Image (tube, grey):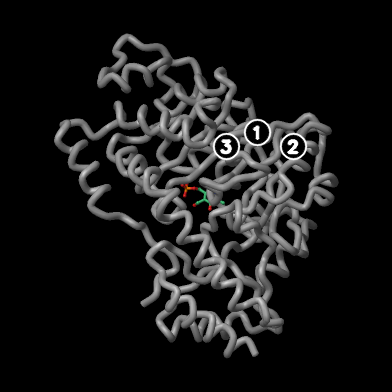
Amino acid sequence: VIRLSKSIIDHLEERALKRVLAAGYLGMGSEVKSFEEELSAYLSGEKKSVVCVNSGTAALHLALQALGVGPGDEVIVPTFTFVASFQAISATGATPVACDVLENNALIDLDDAKNRVTSKTKAIMPVHYASYPGDLNSVYAFAKRYGLCVVEDAAHAFGCEYQGQKIGGFGDTVCFSFDGIKNITSGEGGAIVTSDEKIIEKIKDARLLGVIKDSDNRYLGKRSWDFDVAEQGWRYHMSDLMAAIGRVQLQRFEGEFKPIRQNLAKRYRSLLKANTNIGLFDTDLKNIIPHIMPIRVFNGKRNVLKDSLESAGIQTGIHYKPNHLLTKYKVKGVDLPVAEKLYSEILTLPLHPELTYNDVDLITNIVNQISK
Ligand SMILES: Cc1ncc(COP(=O)(O)O)c(C=O)c1O
């Protein structure tokens, strides 16, 4: 079987885990602090602060909460994303307002977003689908024009660059996911990146059930006993076990995972680009590191191709079912035609650092045969 995605773990992660096991405390401690510092150095040359949490969803939820997003507010978000983006918004009590995407890259369509701004709109959440940030400057200009906060859902975009800077190295509030199959993993996990120290303090408290200034004690292997709580918090902190894996993955990323992912995606694209029955999304493989490899299958052949690949032992995926089609997020009268069309065409092909060029050749042969 050729897997759609995979955690890539070897003896280095094993050794790091043994170090934590031997220390006799698996919860949040100095490993988390080190991971946060190393992420800050990697992403921003230490210009930004990083807070680690136990999922990308938790990162988005805490970022929104710290920015004051709550009941009665609206957050504009592209419908073409994982349900995590929507759940993080509704978890604050705010309403996710689904908007359509651009056909050529599946990223937020700001012309459509413009029509969805109301007096309740508080934030906009661009999603870097398939790791591509698109025209991020225009998203920030849009937010400025309407007085909105920006929370970037950069779950797919760890390590990617935009105009010479890393995603997370600039901008407002940026959230990453380190779940099992992302560009780097900590088992599960996530991080919030910002230079606003007030937001950082709020998030640090909120990830530990709202216990004020507990993070600094935890980093030192201590606890706060006579503590105070002033705000709603959550049990969202990262553990040392997770951070130990994440630190090794960060070390391996530039030299190992990054070039492999980029080269595999380049090979896919070069073997599919002549096929007029297949569509490729716009991207920028010099500057981005692809987390997934979605294609469009024209002429109504998506499901036939999915079944053919499946019977050849090749796993595929569909990223994503538009969220405005889900019972919880359906709004009467809202149709998002581009996202709905893309949903009928998309198919995600395997992409992970243990995939080989031979695998890509085999997969693209089937794609080119069946889509004819
Ligand atoms: C676009 C997007 N947003 C948010 C998330 C949430 O991340 P996590 O799975 O770490 O909660 C994911 C990943 O699952 C994602 O793909």
Give percent across and percent down for residue 97. 71, 46
Residue at image position (43%, 29%) is 207
Residue 140, numbered circle: 2
- For disc 3, the marked residue is 168
Given the image, on which type of amino acid does mark 3 rest? Gly
Decide if residue 298 is on the left or right side of residue 142: left
- Give the class, few, some or many, for how many residues have Cα within 10 Å of label 2's Cα (few <14, many ≥20): some
- Give the quadrant of residue 245: top left
Given the image, on which type of amino acid does mark 2 rest? Tyr
- Marks 1 and 3 close (CB-CB < 8 Å): yes
Give percent across and percent down for residue 188. 38, 46
Q: CA distance from mark 2 to mark 3?
A: 14 Å
Give percent across and percent down for residue 76. 71, 43
- The front one of 363 and 197 is 363
Give the SS element for disc 3: loop
Decide if residue 207 is on the left or right side of residue 15: right
Decide if residue 291 is on the left or right side of residue 77: left
- Marks 1 and 2 close (CB-CB < 8 Å): yes
Give percent across and percent down for residue 340. 71, 66
- Give the class, few, some or many, for how many residues have Cα within 10 Å of label 1's Cα (few <14, many ≥20): some
Residue at image position (17%, 38%) is 21
Residue 171, numbered circle: 1
